[in-house]
Amino acid sequence: MAISKAEIEKLAKLAKLSFSDEELERFTAEFDEIIAFADTINQSIEGGTEQIRSVGARMVSFDDLRPDEVMPSLPNEKILSNVEGYNGFFSVERSKK
Amino acid sequence: MNYEIVCGIETHIELATKTKIFCGCTTEFGGEPNTHCCPVCTGQPGTLPILNQKVVEYAIKAGLALNCKINTKSHMDRKNYVYPDLPKAYQISQYDEPLCEKGYIELDSGKRIGITRIHIEEDAGKLVHENGYTYIDYNRGGVPLIEIVSEPDISSAEEAREYAEKLQLTMRYIGISDCKMQEGSMRCDVNLSLRKPGDPNFGVRTEIKNINSLSFIQKAVIAEAERQADILDAGGTVVQQTMRYDEATNSVTPMRDKENSDDYRYFPDPDILRFCIDEAKVEEIRASLPELPFAKLRRYVNDLGLPEATAKQISRYRKVAEFFEGALAEGASVKNAANLIVGTIFSNMDTEEEKELFAVRISAAQFAALVKLADEKKINIGVAQSTLQKMLESGKPVEEFIKPEDLVGISDEVLENLCREAIEANPRAVDDVRNGKDKAINVMFGYIMKKTGGKADIRKAEALLRKLIGP
Ligand SMILES: [Zn+2]
């Protein structure tokens, strides 16, 4: 096992999500498979993924960075079109916890 | 029992770029809620953040001004935590490859406070809690910040304040931020623990979050050191936690449990390419830095011979220093220029902010023209001060107020006649002078100055008066 149920519980807590014991068991198994899959990639590369980051990855130079020029923002209605808005704000009901 | 304070400060500074760190939205303060926003800075799925060049440039400037080593290779990381002020549930920050490392700030005592690192990151949105709801405005979300982390080298409340003040001054000087603590463009978190003198180990530390004034930093350090000392004296242990300083009661109270840093699960942001800055670019940025305030202060005292207090007042504000140096370049004398700035111009400016902005209506060259008249003794200091005041109010040059004929001065004949008049008009003062009350001569000076509008040569007048009054 690459990951324990306790670790999954901790991740859920950090993400402010709650699951039943049954769900946690299932996720632990699923996560384990996903990690095993990613490990296969890691093993197929000499030097591991660290190697990709330090040598293989493309880098940009200072001159390629974005110039500091203002672009139009989106209209407020558009920004709030997928959510419940209130007076131009995003609004969320506070949890009682 | 006596304890030693071990203190470090983390400072967040909002950079004065035009746009946000990863999108072209304006960083302008205020605005209607969620109007300075786009899909990138509200964290919509599928959007691509692109790093602002100016943010990197400004952070390097900060690093160089604080004697840091600049990392020529750097990347962005994701710092994960769930809170509604972060739409993506992570903040794009830097973890193991910050732009700048290993610098220092030197205090007046000569002690150096180490700078561990400076990294760039995005600011979070603003939350308003009301009636069981949280309202979110992401206008500030994505505004670029630098976080400057000091070593735990600070060992008193005064040092903590001086460190923050010097940091603020330097950042303003290099023009990367206005560092207004009240408006939140500079915010300090203070880490503090106590230990017995000579103990090599650190005690348990607490972190006081978001202190928004220099004097509160000093007070918070004192209050927290006292609180921890009381716990230790009573045989208790300090709990590692996040605290808040309350200025109304001058006390420090717990805020919320802090997550351990490994709970942030930092990892490289796969959306943003690693970037490199070549040495030539770093040198180009170094060359663009102005002379820093502390170097200026030393030069004003050592090379120009200004008194420390005057030199401090002028070097403290970049625009004032530039105005002063501009006047010197036009031939004004150091002493008169400095005294007229500190005495007359500053008397029109009540706040630090006004001095910082230094919006005067005359140019350094126009100011120098006036100073030179005083240098050449064509006008006395009193006239120089009142004329300068008129120039500042009207924005008009010195010629508007002092005509060439005013500068000829008072002829010796006229001055002698005036002295005789002064003696005749003040018999009692004359008697006093004769009886050894030397200060009574001021009465005659007053008379002559009034008659000439302050233009008489006071030394000549004194010599004449003494001759006329006799022994
Ligand atoms: Zn945006």
Image: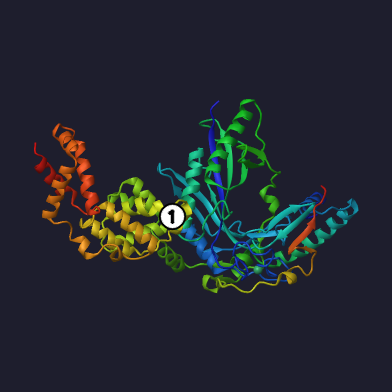
In which quadrant of the rendered image does the N terminus of chain B lie?
Answer: top right
Amino acid type, residue under disc 1 in the picture: Lys
Q: Position of residue B264 (x, y in %)?
A: 69, 53
View quadrant of ligand 1: bottom right
In which quadrant of the rendered image does the C terminus of chain B lie?
Answer: top left
Judge by depth and name the residue closer to the eye, B227 or B203: B227
Left/right placement of residue B2 relative to residue B447 reads: right
Q: Which element is circle 1 on?
A: helix
* Ligand 1 neighbours mark 1 (CB distance < 8 Å): no
Q: Is residue B307 visible?
A: yes
Rendered residue at 61%/43% (across/down): B208
Left/right placement of residue B297 relative to residue B157 reads: left
Q: How many marks?
A: 1
Q: Position of residue A14 (x, y in %)?
A: 76, 52
Q: Residue furthest right?
A: A22
Rendered residue at 55%/61% (across/down): B15
Q: Which residue is mark 1?
A: B355
Chain identifier of the residue bearing label 1 in the image? B
